[in-house]
Amino acid sequence: MPVDKMVDLSSRQLRRLPLHICSFRELVKLYLSNNNLTQLPPELEQLQNLQILALDFNNFRALPLAVCALKQLCILYLGNNKLCSLPLELQLLQNLRTLWVESNCLQQLPEVVCELSLLKTLHAGSNALRTLPARLRGLRELRSIWLSGNLLAEFPSVLLHMPSLEVIDVDRNAIRFFPSLAHLPGLKLVIYDHNPCRNAPKVAKGVRRVGRWSEESPEPRKRSGAVIEISLNERPLPPPANKAESEAEAC
């Protein structure tokens, strides 16, 4: 058993998880990123102290059910796989705070995500999402949602009913009109760049916006009033670029 209760087997070209890893019952962090994994052994569920599991950049077409038995998980990385759905058993992960499902094959956000009552951060960019489920508004702990690179033709109306949201990222979609977001008391940042919109979302004083006006209907940059459109070199930091940053936020 590693002294730091962490195992990092990233970038090892693994096709299967070495079974002896499942005997490390006190393991807290397991990184299996950037391999060739398509499945995991049932013995994985023995790791009942696991809090962080990284399965991103693999070849999973379905989430192994053993993952859903790890009830202490607070961060789950599933990005850059081939997932088209998530199992209903995911709702068993009631301690999950951060979920990464970016760069998969999701055509809709699985309803089971709405059962993750403690979820604070959801990364679902670079899929093929066209809408969001109405039940998402039940996630009262959700603070940031990252949806860039999807197929949203309209701003998801459910987000208008989520007053605890602090960050909304809908960059690189197909949104033509933005409703006012000025009523969202917790909002700190909205990213709406690379949409064919003819208006920018109205926001409350102090909220940062990142976005350009469409070329077809340019608007002047506003230097007075509550909000100033941010230029490229003034943009706030993107989502956490590495796992350490993300984990510091969530755990």
Image (cartoon, helix red, strand yellow):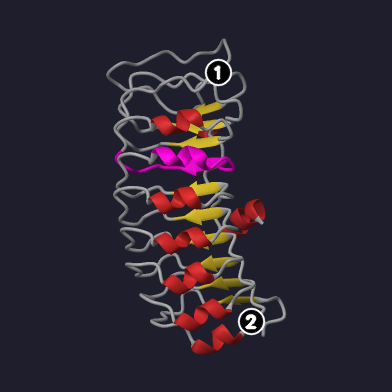
Q: Which residue is mark 1?
A: 227
* Image coords of residue 176 (percent x, y): 31, 25
Looking at numbered disc 1 in the image, what kind of residue is underneath it? Val
Image position of 110 (left or right of 5) = left
Using residue 85 as the reference point, say whether residue 75 is left or right of it.
right
| 23 sits left or right of 161 in the view | right
Q: CA distance from mark 1 to mark 2?
A: 51 Å
Residue shown at the point (67%, 85%) measured from the top left: 1
- In the rendering, at what x and y percent does residue 7 appear? 59, 77
Which residue is nearer to you in this view: 243 or 28? 28
Say which quarter of the image contains residue 135.
top left
Residue beneath disc 2: 25
Q: Is residue 58 magenta?
A: no
State whether residue 64 is above or below residue 193.
below
Q: Measuring 50% from the left and 83% from the top, which residue is drawn there?
A: 43
On the image, the x and y values in percent for residue 186 come to: 61, 30
Looking at this view, name the residue that lies furthest to the top: 224
Residue 138 falls inside the magenta stretch = yes
| Segment colored magenta | 134-151
In this view, the residue in front, 83 or 34, is: 83
